[in-house]
Image (cartoon, grey):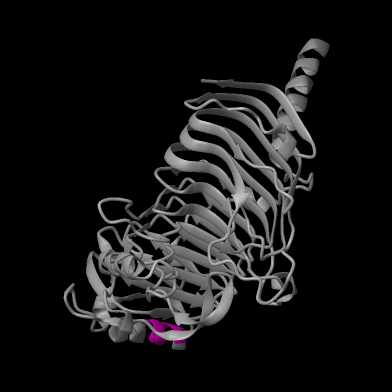
Amino acid sequence: MFKRFFTIFLCSVLSGNLVFAQNLFPDGTAVPDWFSQIKETTINSLGKQYRITSFGVKKDSNILQTKAIQTVIDKAAADGGGVIIVPKGTFLSGSLFFKPNTHLHLEKGATIKGSSDISDFVLQETRIEGQTVKYFTALVNADKVDGFTISGKGTLNGNGLTYWQHFWLRRAFNPQCTNMDEMRPRLLYISDSKDVQISGIRLINSPFWTSHYYRCENLKLLNLYIYAPYAPVKAPSSDAIDLDVCKNVLIKNCYMSVNDDAVALKGGKGPFADKDSNNGSNENIIIEDNTFGFCHSALTCGSESIHNRNIILRRIKIEHATRLLWLKMRPDTPQNYEYISVEDIKGNVANMLFIKHWTQFFDLKGEKNIRLSYASNVSFKNISLDCDAAFNVKKSEQYFLSNFSFSNINVKATKSDQIPRDAFEKLTLEKVNIEK
C-alpha cells in the first residue's frame, strides 16, 4: 500500500514539476490558464447569421463588391451584432470594416479577394511601421471590436502580384524607395481590441504585411495557413504576423512561409520612441507547435521595436528559413529585448541566432548620439538544426548582450562556427555541440 502510494505521489510530483515548468514565463511569472484554453469558434453562439449572398452580394469574382459586403456588416452591427458568413465562391473587395459585436466566418471554398487597385482601399490614420500616420487600410479591418473572431476554412487572398511587381520596379528606379512609398494595403489589421481569436483560415498573397495586430490583448491565432511567395516574384515585406504593442498572445498550430519575417514584434521607432504614448511593449507571447517554411526569420524583434518581454518560441519545425531568432538592433531607437526562450526546435535554417545592427532608413531626427539597445536573459535549449552558422553575432558598443544561455544544442554547420564569447557579458554553455 505504501509502495503504491509512494509511486503515485512520485509520478504526481514529476508530472507536477513538468506542468509547472511549462507554465512559467522566462522571467519566472506564472502563465495564465487562458493560454491553455483552446476552444473552436462556434458560430452558432455568435448571434444572428448574415449570409452575404442573401443580402445582394453576387457570386461573381469580377465585380468589385466592397460596398455591398460593407452594407451587410453595417446591418449586422445595427441589428445588435452577428456573424457575417461568406459562402463558397470568390468575392472581390477593397477595405472592409468590422464593427462591435460582428464576426467573420469563411466557409470552405470561400474567398475574399483584395482589389489590385489601391484606390479601392481607404486612406486614413492607422498604424504602420512603428508610426501612427495616414496610410491605406487593410482588406479586413477591426478597430475597438472586443471579442472579434474570424473562423472557418476559407481564404483571405490579398491578390498581391501587381503590387509586388510595382514595388520592385520602383525600387529598381529608386533604391531608397521605402516599403510605404509603393502604396500597398495589408491583408488583415486588428487594433485596440481584446479577446480576439483568428482560427482555421488561409491568409495568402498579401500585398504588404499579412496580418497586423496593434494594441491587442488576449489574442489567439490558431491553425492558420499563412503564405506569400519568394519566387518567381518576391512578395516584399509580407510578414506573416506583426505584433505591435500587444499583451497575452498565443500563436499555435500555424504554418507560415512568407518573403519576410514570420513573427515580428514591433512597437515603435526613433530616438524618442519610448516617450510616445502610441508606442509600447509586447509582453507574454507564446509561439508554439508551429511549422515555418521559407522566411527571413521565424521570430524577429524589430525592426520597429522598443521593448519585448516574456517571449516563448517552442516546439517548432523549421525548413529553409534564413534565421531562427533575429534581434534587430537600431542605433536610432532605444531597445530592450528581455526574457526570451527558444526551445525544442528541429529542422534547418541558415542562422540559428542573428544579432547585428539594423540601419535601414536610419534616422536620429537631428539627435547627435545614437541610442543604446539591450538584450538579456535569452535562452536556447533542446535545439537540433542544420545551419550555415549557429551564431551570427558581432560585439558592438551600440548594444549590450547579457545572460545568454545555451543547453543541449546539436547543430551541424556548413561554415566554421566559433561561439563569439566576447559579444556576451555573461554566457552559459551546457552540452553545446556544433559540428562542421
Q: Residue furthest front?
A: 368
Q: Is residue 347 magenta?
A: no
How many badges with numbers are in the image?
0
Within the image, what quadrant is residue 333 found in? bottom right
Residue 316 seen by the camera: no
In depth, the one of 334 and 89 nearer the eye is 334
Within the image, what quadrant is residue 341 found in? top right
Q: Residue furthest right?
A: 2
Task: In the rendered view, tell whether residue 228 sits above or below residue 159.
Answer: above
Left or right of residue 298: residue 422:
right
Image spot of residue 106 (x, y percent): 34, 64
- Residue at image position (74%, 50%) is 397
Within the image, what quadrant is residue 202 found in? bottom left
Q: Is residue 74 magenta?
A: yes
In depth, the one of 324 and 148 nearer the eye is 324
- Which range is magenta? 73-77
In depth, the one of 168 and 381 nearer the eye is 168
